């Protein structure tokens, strides 16, 4: 699956997880031949009547037609008394496609609405792939009836595969929360590998739960988790035109409705939801284009939260830091340079830099017991942790990224061909 | 010269230019064995008594000891009644070296002051290379007397070589201005190849002129040119800890003193100086680590100057744009994505994208006469021009960058080793 010829990321999990079935959500995937041959490239998801919906989308000023359409539809409120549907294609982003882009969205969502007997205003869509080429929406429309007939509660793993582009493995995560009177299940899938710097939104992510929860509360549970999950990852600093996350709650769990988030089951639900979001975000980084290392960058002691974010992202996006990691070189001087360019308040003499548990630099200088051999040995690990304490205040931020390798160049020097 | 094993950039000029001798400036280069073997790595520059000086430096919050020292010395005013000197080493940046960093600066500049018989307050220094390792300043001090004996007005080309790190060719540029009563000469050298995103400053650049001009006016002539030259280039978005530019005017030209910059010879001098600065800045990009393409990114029609800068730099720093250029792929959709993520005001339907003279996209859509074959053929050129008009206002900005290739990864995955 994924782009022909791409080896599976060395950071991939051993296998796709067993995701719980979410009562009230069905999936069907098929091959429309939009760009890829010999694989599925369209997924249809049906959510049962009575569900509530929430979403988050890229703030790119050149965002795709489907993103604009989803935002308009969700703005009407997240209630789906007649059910809802999501149709996703890979191979073409339908972005920067002018008025024709919206026409393609209308054609596809209209066909889904007709096939499933629901208003088009409840049919959401996503497209991912090349930017600026007309979406051959007729090919999608042509298989919608087949997809509608094949809808099945067990199809989520196939859906995770159909939405892949340069991804080398499908991504899924789940959680179970003990509610009052029964369990609440959460399951989600994501795609993403390159053009990953979601700041303020996400990539393509679909989350499902059988919780009973009103739409505004569902949106609040989702939004409060974005900064620490999807907005805390970067592969290449390039923000997509197409990032979209949709969360649907079917209300089919026997558990009592969630009516507040600040304690009890509500707080547990939020924690579990954010855990699933963090798992999926980290899986996107583990499938970062060309990645061979997974890197946690933890910044503490910043003068403000904003400064902590600036420093963490300056390090995580620095080509020089990322190539040093690829070369397993403990070149902490490049961390110093990244802090210096970040625009955040910093004081050389209060800066502390750690790789794993080792202190490499402190008090404006290489640590007295700095051990180059031990530092180099640490860099051989597949999962790395870089911690920077600025020694100025309480601002803290943790983000995740990957290294920058020849694989990234290979994949992106000819993505369209 | 440069890093062992690095081929000369395909974007390098055919040869180092013939630079005019600047009366009152002498150069000597030597090998101190700081890091590199079998090549020169220290340059001493002496400027005759009566010169005026100006400078510009990185605003990194983790800037090197020598940068802080230069800034303190220049803050006392740019007059050098007893002459001035500049001592530069490659192979070690003396950055993030704590209090020992300043001690190394004092040792080196003190030795130069003693050898040349001038106050240490007029001896400037630069160090470029690895960050965070102690500078073996004794090795520099040991050759200063030899350097002082070898000072020569014709040594500028050797100086351009001695200051190289990952540079693959030495960089020089010059201009001659017709003054009142004689010619005014300008000559400069620069080093820089990676960690290039000078925003607000420069890399290592030394400019010399025989003009007679007061220090405040000289600083004004320099500062007014920074935004359109050194602040308009980026190789990898990583700002250095060590960027420094020093401009010395010896007053040895027979031409009348320059007493104003807003007309006549003064305006001509400013234009010529900025031309030399632009030439050197572009040469740094042409020696960008791993570069195979030189790319001009010209943004017009932005709502403000700040927006134009954001869009130009978002395009010039986008790994996806730069890898597409490396692959000679006319993937203009990635330009759209870079505009979208830039943070600048943008309207999809007013955006126009040109490669060379070809319009690829306009009115929110691929151009009606878009020709993929012609666009692909254009990408084969070594020098490329990407023009983006936002259609919103008068903000304009032109910047220069290079592509992102396997060579960049090769160079930076093991720079320290």
Image (tube, coloured by chain):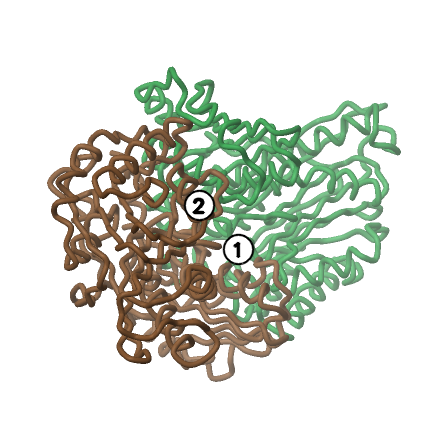
Chain colours: A green, B brown
Residue at the (31%, 62%) spot, across then down:
B280
In this view, the residue in front, B226 or A216, is B226
Q: Is residue B323 above or below residue B362?
A: above
Eye-nearest disc, 1 or 2: 2
Q: Are marks 1 and 2 in contact (CB under 8 Å)?
A: no
> Is B23 displayed left or right of B52 in the figure?
left
> Is A187 displayed left or right of B71 in the figure?
right
**Quarter of image, res A277:** top right
Which percent across, then down, holds residue A131? 52, 64
Residue at the (55%, 46%) spot, across then down:
A191
* Dot 2: chain letter: B
The residue carrying pointer 1 sits among few (fewer than 14), some (14 to 19) or many (20 or more) residues within 10 Å by Cα, namely: many
Q: Is residue B264 visible?
A: yes
Q: Which residue is mark 2?
A: B71
The residue carrying pointer 2 sits among few (fewer than 14), some (14 to 19) or many (20 or more) residues within 10 Å by Cα, namely: some
In this view, the residue in front, A202 or B23, is B23
> Is B149 displayed left or right of A178 in the figure?
left
**Quarter of image, res A109:** bottom right
Under circle 2, the secondary element is helix
Q: Which residue is mark 1?
A: A41
Q: Residue furthest bottom?
A: B369
Q: Is residue B197 above or below residue A141?
A: above
Which percent across, then down, holds residue B137? 26, 31
In this view, the residue in front, A416 or B218, is B218
* Dot 1: chain letter: A
């Amino acid at each position: 699956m994924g782009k022909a010829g791409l080896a599976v990321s060395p950071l991939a999990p051993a296998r796709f997880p067993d995701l719980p079935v979410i009562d009230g959500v069905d999936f069907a995937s098929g091959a429309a031949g939009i760009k890829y041959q010999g694989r599925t490239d369209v997924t249809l998801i049906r959510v049962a009547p009575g569900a509530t919906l929430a979403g988050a989308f890229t703030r790119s000023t050149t965002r795709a037609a489907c993103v604009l359409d989803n935002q308009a539809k969700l703005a009407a409120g997240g209630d789906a008394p007649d059910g809802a549907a999501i149709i996703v294609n890979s191979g073409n982003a339908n972005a920067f496609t002018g008025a024709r882009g919206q026409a393609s969205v209308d054609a596809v969502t209209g066909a889904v609405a007709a096939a499933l007997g629901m208003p088009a205003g409840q049919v959401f869509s996503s497209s991912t792939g090349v930017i600026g080429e007309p979406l051959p929406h007729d090919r999608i429309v042509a298989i919608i009836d087949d997809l509608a007939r094949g809808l099945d509660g067990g199809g989520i793993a196939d859906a995770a595969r159909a939405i892949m582009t340069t991804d080398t493995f499908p991504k899924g995560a789940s959680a179970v929360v003990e509610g009052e009177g029964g369990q609440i299940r959460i399951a989600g899938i994501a795609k993403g590998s390159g053009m990953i710097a979601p700041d303020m939104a996400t990539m393509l992510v679909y989350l499902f739960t059988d919780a009973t929860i009103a739409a505004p509360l569902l949106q609040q549970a989702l939004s409060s988790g974005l900064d620490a999950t999807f907005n805390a990852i970067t592969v290449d600093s390039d923000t997509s035109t197409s990032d979209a996350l949709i969360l649907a709650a079917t209300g089919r769990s026997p558990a009592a409705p969630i009516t507040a988030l600040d304690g009890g089951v509500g707080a547990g639900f939020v924690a579990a939801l954010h855990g699933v979001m963090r798992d999926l975000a980290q899986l996107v980084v583990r499938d970062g284009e060309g990645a061979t290392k997974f890197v946690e960058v933890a910044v503490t002691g910043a003068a403000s939260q904003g400064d902590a974010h600036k420093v963490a992202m300056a390090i995580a996006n620095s080509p020089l830091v990322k190539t040093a990691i690829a070369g397993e070189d403990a070149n902490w001087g490049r961390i110093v340079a990244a802090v210096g360019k970040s625009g955040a308040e910093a004081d050389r003499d209060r800066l502390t830099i750690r790789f794993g548990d080792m202190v490499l630099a402190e008090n404006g200088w290489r640590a007295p017991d700095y051990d180059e051999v031990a530092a180099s040995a640490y860099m051989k690990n597949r999962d790395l942790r870089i911690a920077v304490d600025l020694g100025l205040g309480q601002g803290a931020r943790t983000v995740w990224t990957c290294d920058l390798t020849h694989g990234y160049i290979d994949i992106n020097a000819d993505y369209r061909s």
